[in-house]
Image: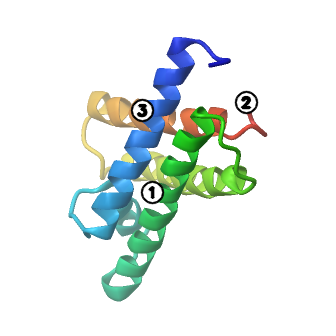
Amino acid sequence: MKEGIGVFIWKLSVAAYLIANGVLGLMRARGGDFDIIFSRLGFKGDTLNIFVIVAGVIAIVAGIVILLEKFEVSLPFLSLLILVVAIIWAVYIIVNIISWFTGGMGDFWHFLQRLAVHSMVLGSLLVANRRFS
């Protein structure tokens, strides 16, 4: 292992988070992050289902690829997959900020808590993507 234990745990947790969200997306579980993200972007019905399922598959693959990379199995499309998920997360963060300013997110401290969590996920994705680390 070239990196320290902290980076190992960080990347392992990002992989687990992506896989869990991907599975929730494939199960079409209400409350999964992809369901929330695409619902807030205004998608409904079949369009929502398609976006959630596609994002779920991408997230599962990205999570598995991050795990493989941790065990020094190199795959050329890792950066692209992680970039796609990072873009989805960045858009979600922007939508949340706009929603909060327009009155739809509740009090500031809960908003800040969720914003911090999703910013950590975005930062982790960017660190996992070798182009941005």
Query: How many other residues sit within 10 Å of disc 1, few (<14), some (14-19) or many (≥20)?
Result: many
- Please give the residue where the numbered disc 2 appears in the rendered image: 133
Looking at the picture, does residue 34 appear above or below residue 28? above
Of the two numbered discs 2 and 3 on the same chain, state the one appearing first in sequence: 3
Query: How many other residues sit within 10 Å of disc 3, few (<14), some (14-19) or many (≥20)?
Result: some
Could you say which is closer to the camera, residue 116 or residue 72? Answer: 72
Residue furthest bottom as drawn: 46
Mark 1 and mark 3: Cα distance apart in space: 13 Å
Residue at x-position 78% and y-position 40%: 131
Report the side of 64 relative to 100 (left or right).
Answer: right
Does residue 70 show up?
yes
- Please give the residue where the numbered disc 3 appears in the rendered image: 13
- Please give the residue where the numbered disc 1 appears in the rendered image: 60
Horizontal and vertical percent for residue 114? 35, 36
Mark 2 and mark 1: Cα distance apart in space: 21 Å
Horizontal and vertical percent for residue 36? 32, 59
